[in-house]
Image (tube, coloured by chain):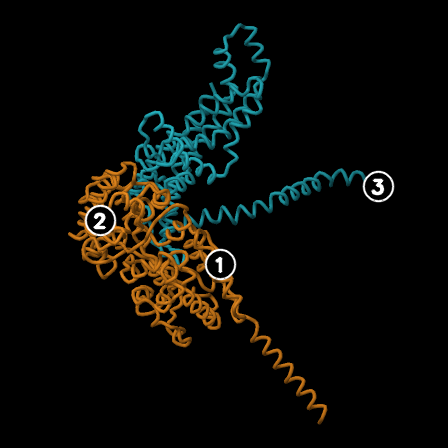
Chain colours: A cyan, B orange
């Protein structure tokens, strides 16, 4: 190379590029292969199966659109969808707003701040079975702690998880307590990204704390906010574990959400075709909702 | 010549040694179970004892979490790596047998000389489908009637001989409930499985007592929307809703264990739990013949032989039958979990009859009412449970519950 610099100059960018490309492919290769086998293939196979009747043991039997037609006429599908929306509407705003308020509070310098950050984040570290079991026991009708205190102060204590009125709110409260910490951390990171100069400038201009929050903090959080809202709505729509462990969809189906219904159809009744159809319709609903949010909040960002 | 003789004899000796060592190497049988609670230790103990007592068969247990069991077994059957044998609820047999998942055992039972005639005929009949045997029952687990002796005495429901007086008729059930409530309004007269596990079980028992049945012989047509089905459901509605004699939603086992319930109607597996509770003075008996004749819900743990990709391995089936023969002959050990042994000789044995509580209700196996054979047992159970639960929450009338169950069950089993 030293003897013939021209050639080396000529060859090296191509070689370098090839080498870089190769390295890149090598790095993503294993993960991509896993993704291909464990995600893309099952997703496509699910689509294929949704046009079939299949109970795992036998061979899939082609039934055309039968599963989708059945779904449209299935009252349990619609009630599950309604319950899913109900949960999403009840749980997403509080999880986002409480997390934001806590983040604002925990972003101020005060004694024990780190400790409180840890305390509020802690439930997120629990596995779902631990988090839900704690709440099952707290909310237990006769022997639960909450009802014990309610009775002590002379209030009527409902059987939270066995009531069509209170079961869903109880699952919502459990979810807020359990998952708040994730949004809290994201908001905290977002707050720390807002340049200090902006606050100083606001101060010099004589802005009130409210003005500062409205014109500096909130706009500064806009991207983060959009991310949190979209992720939270998706997470809420996908709710499964809390329902599966706390109520199994009961009492009599009042907390049965779509993913729970899908699970029942697939793994209790072995109706893989119908379950796949539910999954695909669900996927389309989540996609549409996400796109709508994206559009709404994206437009806001441009002005 | 001499040399040839030596070579020959050495070969023969080696051959014999080799053959015998092959013969002596034990047959390995993989065995899937779903026991995790109180039952688990008794099953592990049985397997350990069997493995220690003989050297021809080695049983290797693999415990699958209960919630995933049927899913995992289905996946294993489809993937060609099913266990050699597996525990199974006999109510789930038809859906798997229809899909040709299990080996029919008739010929192997005959070759082995399996003591079929020693098995309780009610349970033995339940493991047969299309005139073939597809599973070996290891127990019957019916619902029985647990009573808190102290509460019965406190409310004065005692016979002249000092034994507790068990309510025998619908009126007596209500009368006893009132007595308990009058004594202490905080007590629950009847703790029953409500949601979501087994609300339908008591009803199935009661409607059979009244002379009704759940499904027609075809296993598809609902037969429960009948005067018998209504009578049974009305009694339950009266107990739970009108009189508030049950606490919907709270675990029946927990209520009884904490001495907050006078009676628990529940599966026999509760025995193993209740007897460990200190200070709980209780008894167990068969569900009384409320509507005239005896009948109680039951299911049964049985063992199936999954069909393997490579065909049937007769040596493994023979080894498995030896294990099952031994295990059911030692049924008194399994009965410690509360279950009723399927073999008559065990029921008559000293080992079994010296156990507490179990002999009192052992006869319940003869009055066992199983969920009728159907290809969708879980879905059938879930639908029945959900509507009975709705009835218990007073969201439906008895009439509405029956009509809607009938429509939905017909739709599922179609």
Write down the residue under mark 1. Answer: B44
CA distance for labels 1 and 3: 78 Å
Q: Give the residue at the far bottom of this rendering.
A: B1
**x, y percentage for residue B296?**
27, 56
CA distance for labels 1 and 2: 44 Å
Q: Is residue A222 left or right of residue B303?
A: right
**x, y percentage for residue B208?**
22, 56
CA distance for labels 2 and 3: 90 Å
Write down the residue under mark 3. Answer: A3
Q: Residues within 10 Å of mark 3 (few under 14, many from 20)?
A: few
Residue at (57% x, 72% y) in the render = B25
Q: Give the residue at the far left of this rendering.
A: B227
**x, y percentage for residue A30?**
60, 47
In the rendered image of this protein, does residue A33 appear above or below residue B351?
above
Q: Which is in the foreground here, disc 1 or disc 2? A: 1
**x, y percentage for residue A73?**
27, 44
Q: Name the mark on residue B185.
A: none
Q: Residues within 10 Å of mark 1 (few under 14, many from 20)?
A: few
Write down the residue under mark 2. Answer: B407
- What chain letter is assigned to the residue under label 2? B
Label 2: element kind: helix
Q: Which is in the foreground here, disc 1 or disc 3? A: 1
Q: Which quadrant holds the C terminus of chain B?
A: bottom left
Label 1: element kind: helix
């Amino acid at each position: 190379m030293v003897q013939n610099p021209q050639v080396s100059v000529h060859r090296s960018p191509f070689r370098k590029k090839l080498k870089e490309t190769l390295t890149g492919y090598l790095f993503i290769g294993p993960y991509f292969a896993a993704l291909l086998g464990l995600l893309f293939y099952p997703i496509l196979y699910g689509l294929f199966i949704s046009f079939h009747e299949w109970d795992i043991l036998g061979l899939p039997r082609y039934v055309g659109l039968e599963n989708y037609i059945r779904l449209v006429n299935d009252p349990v599908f619609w009630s599950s969808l309604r319950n899913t929306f109900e949960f999403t509407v009840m749980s997403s705003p509080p999880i986002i707003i409480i997390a934001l308020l806590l983040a604002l509070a925990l972003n101020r310098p005060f004694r024990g701040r780190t400790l409180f950050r840890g305390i509020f984040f802690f439930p997120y570290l629990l596995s779902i079975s631990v988090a839900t079991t704690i709440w099952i026991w707290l909310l237990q009708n006769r022997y639960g702690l909450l009802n014990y205190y309610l009775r002590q102060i002379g209030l009527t204590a409902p059987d939270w998880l066995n009531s069509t009125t209170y079961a869903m709110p109880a699952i919502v409260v459990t979810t807020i307590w359990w998952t708040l910490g994730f949004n809290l951390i994201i908001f905290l990171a977002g707050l720390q990204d807002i340049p200090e100069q902006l606050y100083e400038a606001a101060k010099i201009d004589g802005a009130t704390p409210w003005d500062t929050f409205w014109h500096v903090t909130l706009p500064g959080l806009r991207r983060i906010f959009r991310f949190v809202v979209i992720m939270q709505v998706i997470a809420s729509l996908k709710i499964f574990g809390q329902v599966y462990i706390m109520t199994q969809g009961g009492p009599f189906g009042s907390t049965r959400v779509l993913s729970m219904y899908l699970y029942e159809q697939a793994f209790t009744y072995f109706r893989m075709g119908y379950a796949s159809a539910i999954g695909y319709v669900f996927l389309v609903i989540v996609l549409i909702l996400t796109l709508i949010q994206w559009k709404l909040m994206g437009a806001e960002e441009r002005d | 010549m001499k040399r040839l003789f030596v070579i020959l004899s050495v070969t023969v000796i080696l051959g014999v040694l080799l053959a015998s060592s092959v013969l002596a190497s034990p047959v390995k049988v993989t065995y899937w179970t779903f026991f995790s609670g109180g039952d688990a230790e008794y099953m592990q103990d049985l397997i350990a004892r069997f493995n220690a007592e003989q050297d021809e068969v080695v049983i290797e247990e693999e415990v699958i979490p209960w919630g995933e069991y049927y899913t995992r077994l289905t996946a294993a059957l489809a993937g060609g790596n099913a266990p050699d044998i597996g525990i199974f609820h006999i109510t789930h047999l038809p859906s798997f047998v229809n899909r040709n998942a299990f080996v029919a055992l008739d010929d192997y039972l005959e070759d082995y000389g399996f003591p079929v005639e020693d098995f309780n005929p009610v349970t033995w009949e339940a493991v047969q489908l299309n005139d073939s045997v597809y599973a070996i029952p290891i127990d019957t687990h019916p619902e029985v009637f647990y009573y808190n002796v102290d509460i019965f005495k406190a409310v004065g429901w005692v016979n002249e001989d000092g034994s507790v007086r068990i309510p025998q008729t619908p009126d007596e059930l209500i009368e006893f409930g009132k007595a308990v409530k009058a004594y202490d309004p905080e007590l629950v007269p009847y703790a029953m499985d409500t949601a979501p596990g087994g609300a339908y079980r008591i009803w199935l028992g009661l409607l059979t007592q009244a002379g009704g049945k759940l499904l027609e012989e075809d296993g598809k047509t609902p037969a429960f929307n009948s005067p018998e089905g209504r009578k049974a459901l009305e009694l339950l509605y009266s107990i739970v809703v009108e009189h508030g004699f049950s606490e919907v939603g709270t675990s029946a086992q927990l209520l009884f264990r904490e001495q907050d319930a006078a009676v628990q109607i529940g599966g026999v597996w509760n025995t193993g739990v209740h007897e460990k509770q200190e200070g709980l003075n209780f008894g167990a008996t068969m569900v009384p013949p409320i509507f005239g004749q005896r009948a109680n819900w039951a299911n049964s743990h049985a063992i199936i032989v999954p069909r393997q990709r490579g065909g049937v391995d007769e040596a493994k089936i023979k080894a498995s039958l030896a294990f099952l023969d031994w295990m059911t002959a030692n049924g008194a050990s399994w009965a410690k979990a509360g279950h009723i042994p399927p073999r008559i000789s065990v029921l008559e044995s000293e080992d079994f009859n010296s156990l507490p509580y179990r002999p009192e209700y052992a006869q319940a196996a003869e009055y066992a009412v199983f969920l009728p054979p159907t290809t969708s047992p879980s879905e059938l159970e879930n639908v029945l449970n959900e509507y009975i639960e709705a009835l218990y929450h007073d969201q439906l009338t008895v009439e509405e519950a029956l009509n809607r169950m009938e429509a939905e069950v017909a739709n599922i089993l179609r």
